[in-house]
Amino acid sequence: MVRIALALISSCCALSALATPPTVYLDDSAAWDAVKREHPQRYAKILEVMKIAQAEPCMTAPAVIRTKLEVNARCEAMVIYTSLPAKTRLRFTLDDTDYAVYVVQEKLSRGGLVPAK
């Protein structure tokens, strides 16, 4: 009985690993060039996603992206990279491919205080 349970668990884990889409990290200029060259329409959509993500706070950006572009996105709202300008990590899926990119958070880079909610 234990062997059957272990076999089921290991097969489920193996299937979930196979179902994971590939991830493209757009922090590398070579990745940008490859997407631009091989998938020009996808490249244009990525630029639209980034434009929205830079204008919106990380907490609302995924909902706005989903509404305007029908793209599932997720943002690491609790992780702000202490660079100038401030950045956060955005992940989104287009055509069965996950993309990850650092996005400038313009509203956090202005230097003003934001009241807590």
Image (cartoon, rainbow, N blue to C red):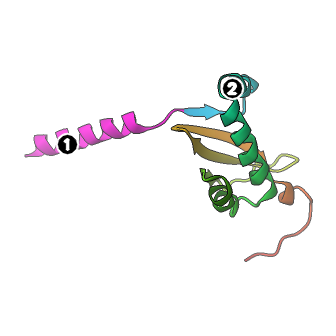
Residue 6 percent across, percent down from the top left:
18, 41
**Which amino acid type is marked by label 2?**
Ala
Quarter residue 63 falls in: bottom right
User: What secondary structure is found at the residue carrying circle 2?
Assistant: helix
Q: Where are the magenta residues, as a range?
A: 1-22
Which quadrant of the figure contains the C terminus?
Answer: bottom right
Residue 13 percent across, percent down from the top left:
31, 40
Q: In this view, does 105 lie to the left or right of 97?
A: right
Residue 45 lies, with reference to residue 67, above or below; the image says above
Residue 29's label in the rendered image is none
Query: Is 31 one of the magenta-colored residues?
Result: no
Q: Main secondary structure of the magenta part?
A: helix
Q: Nearer the viewer, mark 2 or mark 1?
A: 2
Residue 3 percent across, percent down from the top left:
12, 40
Q: Residue furthest right?
A: 111
Quarter residue 40 falls in: top right
Quarter residue 33 falls in: top right
In this view, the residue in front, 18 or 43, is 43
In this view, the residue in front, 75 or 52, is 52
**Which amino acid type is marked by label 1?**
Leu
Disc 1 designates what residue? 8
Disc 2 designates what residue? 31
Residue drawn at 84 percent across, 59 percent down: 108
Residue drawn at 11 percent across, 45 percent down: 2
